[in-house]
Amino acid sequence: MTDTEKSIVQKIKTVDGCVKIFWDMDGTCASMDMHRTDEKLDKGFFYTKRPIKTILRIMHELNNLGAETYILSFCSYYYQKTDKMKWLKRYCEFIPENNIIIIPRRESDINLSKSKEMLKAEYLKEYVSDNDTVYVIDDNESVLLGIKSKMPQINIVSPIDFIE
Ligand SMILES: [Mg+2]
């Protein structure tokens, strides 16, 4: 167990309020697959992504210890959201549907001019309250730093910190 994992476990066991953990998908619990650009817009593409088993196991463990597990992820279009939901049903069935936030960046009323970190921070605000202990796990460092600058109380973690 890495120090990061140990300290989250410790928090879950000792803190009075809720521990909420927001996991990114691509590059965090699912493979990134940047080399498959040609297929990226194919229906079903996301469903073929390789699960990152170490991370999925830790997601499950922290959830079983009492953390609330959330997904905070982007896609471009709504149909990709369906693929992602299907993938989550297969690999993370324990996550309640209400805890899944998948933001279709090109097809919604959200302001596209906003940066990814701004958008994630905006969505996060809806889901966290002052008494919560919150972790955001994301492979994109600028997303993490952007969120931290908007919401300094939040703990940011790279998925690499779970790998021994
Ligand atoms: Mg990512």
Image (cartoon, rainbow, N blue to C red):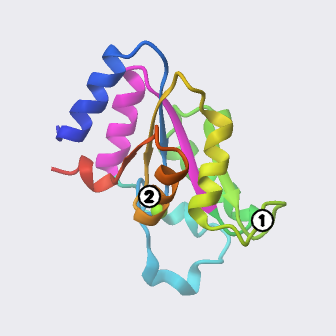
Image position, residue 42 (x, y; %): 65, 76
Circle 1 SS class: loop
Instruction: Bin the neighbour count of mark 1 within 10 Å (Cα to Cα): few under 14, some 14-19, many 20 and up.
Output: few
Is residue 44 something that shows in the picture? yes
Looking at the rendering, the stretch of residues picked out in magenta corresponds to 53-74
Residue in the picture at 28% in, 47% down: 54
Q: Is 70 within the magenta?
A: yes
Mark pair 1, 2: CA separation = 20 Å
Circle 2 SS class: helix
Image quarter (top left, top right, bottom left or bottom right) of the N terminus: top left
Residue 145 has which mark? 2
Q: Is 76 within the magenta?
A: no
Q: Going by the image, does 100 lie left or right of 157?
A: right
| Amino acid on which disc 1 is placed | Asn
Circle 1 residue: 111
Towards the viewer: 34 or 119: 119
Residue in the picture at 49% in, 53% down: 149
Image position, residue 138 (x, y; %): 43, 55
Does 8 appear above or below 112?
Answer: above
Towards the viewer: 43 or 73: 73
| Amino acid on which disc 2 is placed | Leu
Does 150 appear above or below 83?
Answer: above
Does 77 appear above or below 122?
Answer: below
